[in-house]
Amino acid sequence: MILASIALGLLLASSGVPVAPSSLALRSEAAQDAKPDDCKKCENMGRVSCPEHTRAECDLELEFGLLYCSVLVDCPACGGTGLVVCPDCKSESATTSLADRRAQLAARKLALKPFDDTMGRPLRKAESPHFVLVWEVDRLKVNKKHLLAHELLHVYLKRLERLFGDYCATLGVSDQEFESKFDVFVWQFPDDQLEGSQKFCGQGGQGPIKLMGRKPRFSVLGTKAYFQDDEHLHRNVVHSVTHLILSAQQPSEWIGNLKGGWADEGLAHWFEEKYWGICDNYCYQEQDANVDFKGGKFKLALRKMVSSDDTPPISEVLQHNTDTLTLPMHAASFGYVDYLIYRDSAKFNQLLKKLREHVISREALQQVYALSPLEMETQWKAWILSTYPTR
């Protein structure tokens, strides 16, 4: 386990990402500084949880890969580390490690201060290797348990990192293909969403707002006015942030405005279906939470549509931007992406790159998969009939 922790740390460091010392690393250092059974209070770890906070809150700050969390950072005792030097053994190595960590947190606090300055007040936020998350929702029920803001901040930051990891693993993408981190804002009050989306994304609105491209951002009002529960909010975040990741990947470009809506929406739906088996977010009308197509069961709907020869023609689907796709086209777009990933996910990544380079879909399909749209549609329909469920 220690070797795995060190290996992950080296990997993040090699990508230029500052890495916080993990609890395992601190344990290892403390062990070198103390003899077995020297200190009963800290079990020779050299540090203990900060007495100013609950143990659960302190443990959140020990999550590996966490670069910054604002919730405890102003604590005079621990400086946001969630730890203090053991008062009994006063480990020198733990003292040094915690001082280094406090300095790292102070530096990240300063680097992220522009977020606070923009809104004119301190924001609740955390940072990981690929995301900065501003989380202003105070309470939310997750898996039948009511969680408060601090834990929710960490839960959603880990969910975002999972999505990024799955995106990269699915398409064979590396960190080096992204210029900057993704900024995600989840607000509790409508006025904050209106102001925050305007200031951070350049467009105000109470519905979800995305800023695509090299420096991607997403702002959303995370309340029951738009999302009935955590699952629906989480699914919208996954759908929307997939758009951001795709648009930010070099060469950065939003293909949803280049008649690449099928791939743009299709991939966002693909991750919804991967995690939940449901697709219920539609970017052309995101502010309307009541939009629905076949209960979001796209695979079942597509199987029936293909069987009855009722799918929208691929020649038409490939001509649409993201915001003009019809609901049946959304389902078909998901199916195209699902099929092309099934055939060869690395090639699908190549196709997406060509779309971002302004190659039209018809030509990109031919260049990467050696398929015309008609050949693609014929093979896709046969695959749907042989693999998608009937009930």
Image (cartoon, grey):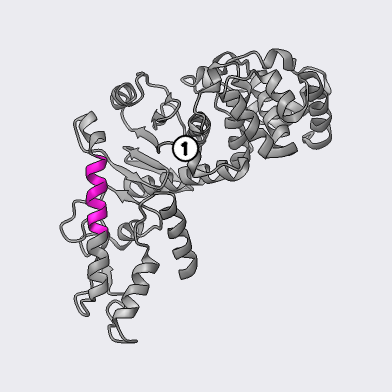
Residue 11 in sight here: yes
Q: Is residue 257 above or below residue 192?
A: above
Residues rendered magenta in the picture: 101-112
Residue 25 rendering spot, x and y as whole percentages: 37, 68
Residue drawn at x 27%, y 83% as measured from the top left: 39
For the C terminus, the quadrant is top right
Residue 75 rendering spot, x and y as whole percentages: 18, 55
Say what secondary structure mark 1 lies in.
loop
Quadrant position of residue 368: top right
Residue 289 rendering spot, x and y as whole percentages: 50, 23
Taking depth in this image into account, of 139 and 350 the one nearest to the observer is 350
Say whether residue 151 is magenta.
no
The chief SS type of the magenta part is helix
The disc labelled 1 sits on which kind of residue?
Phe
Which residue is denoted by mark 1 in the rendering? 178
Mark 1 closeness class: few <14, some 14–19, many ≥20 residues within 10 Å: many
Q: Is residue 338 above or below residue 150?
A: above
Residue drawn at x 60%, y 20% as measured from the top left: 260
Quadrant position of residue 120: top left
Q: Is residue 242 above or below residue 69?
A: above
- Left or right: residue 314 versus residue 136 is right
Residue 338 rendering spot, x and y as whole percentages: 69, 34
Residue 1 in sight here: no
